[in-house]
Image (cartoon, coloured by chain):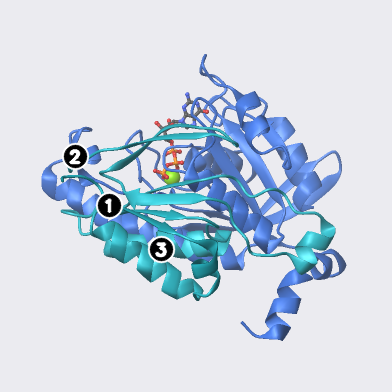
Amino acid sequence: MEGVQLNLISKDRLDKMASMEKIRMILEEVKRGKIVVLESGLTPEEEAKLIELTMLEIDHDKFVGIEVESYPQKSRGFLGKIFGSSGGRLTVIGPANRLKTLQKSDEFIEALVSLGDR
Amino acid sequence: MSVIVKIKKKFSFLFKWFLKKDRMKIGIYGPPNAGKTTLANRILRDWTGDVMGSVSEVPHETRRARLREGVKIEVNGKSVMLDIVDTPGLATKIDFHEFMKFGLSEEEAKKRAKEATEGVIEAIKWLDDLDGVLMVMDATEDPYTQVNVTIVGNIEARNIPLLIVANKIDLPNASPARIKAAFPQHPVVPVSALKGMNIDTLYREIAEKFG
Ligand SMILES: Nc1nc2c(ncn2[C@@H]2O[C@H](COP(=O)(O)OP(=O)(O)OP(=O)(O)O)[C@@H](O)[C@H]2O)c(=O)[nH]1
Ligand SMILES: [Mg+2]
């Protein structure tokens, strides 16, 4: 059967991984054309790191970058700033030539996954 | 991360409040084409008489960060001294074919794409060296993009002051209200960096927020 592979990664699994381990895993899968769904998402710092490493991987031929779908972090209060937990929200990451955002708001995301390369 | 660093980071917003600097390093951030350099040029022209850099309709025109030190902004007797960094537009993907649509040759487009990826990395690195951020968004575009969410999230995580600039309000389909709805926890100032619309309000907000 032809199709696009989806990897759904649980919060339990993500909680056991170090930041760099998560980011490496995501990039490796996405570079193979897969779509990665993270139950608990990434922290803003991890998102920035992911963008940084993505830039290093872009080869201007087969891999032109990633598309990321996630919801804005709920704003944290004073105590949240001090004791803040790192739990991000549901996040979908895929190769830019396969995953396309159609519509996005703070509580609803519509995206298109294509089979072709372009 | 060591516990000390972690604690320092958590409390940095308190430290910053006690140890207010007399000179603030302010980064101008946003996606490509939002009008960051146009805004930087407007600020420099109004307060120093020089310019920051070149502006273009082709995305990723700025591919190296530029720092202009000692920009003094005075509003109603209140003055702030700023070091301003114009950063390359942040993106999660860079496809050289996009540049060819603007008439660049394949070779030029590939070179621009390569430099653009380096620019994105440089912009992210600068985040750790800032005392405040002017985040520029194109008010004619959907604000709920991953780049916007990531930048705002990183500024919040670092507890540095943020002013969101809703740019291009001279265009008929601009909607600063949509940006306010997307980021209700931050002040949003609608301007046209190109035409200078509402720019005095921005200077007042800058003096308030970064002064
Ligand atoms: N109509 C209108 N156009 C604007 C405004 N500000 C900038 N532009 C145009 O938007 C395009 C991009 O402007 P830049 O200032 O180069 O944008 P930038 O954010 O620095 O882009 P990069 O350096 O590529 O990240 C140019 O064609 C500008 O003339 C504005 O307020 N109104
Ligand atoms: Mg620029």
**Local crowd at mark 1 within 10 Å, few (<14), some, or many (≥20)?**
some
Residue furthest out toward the top: B172
The percent position of residue A92, horizontal first and vertical second, equals: 43, 49
In this rendering, do the residues under marks 1 and 2 share a single chain?
Answer: yes
Q: Which residue corresponds to mark 3?
A: A52
Residue located at (77% from left, 68% from top): A83
Subunit that carries the residue with mark 1: A
- Secondary structure category for the residue under label 3: helix
- Secondary structure category for the residue under label 2: loop
- Alpha-carbon span between mark 2 and mark 3: 23 Å
Q: Which residue corresponds to mark 2?
A: A118
The percent position of residue A102, horizontal first and vertical second, equals: 40, 31
Q: Which residue corresponds to mark 1?
A: A5
Q: Is residue A107 left or right of residue A57?
A: right
Q: What colour is chain A?
A: cyan
- Alpha-carbon span between mark 1 and mark 2: 17 Å
**Local crowd at mark 2 within 10 Å, few (<14), some, or many (≥20)?**
few
Between disc 3 and disc 1, the foreground one is: 1
Subunit that carries the residue with mark 3: A
- Which residue type does callout 3 highlight? Glu
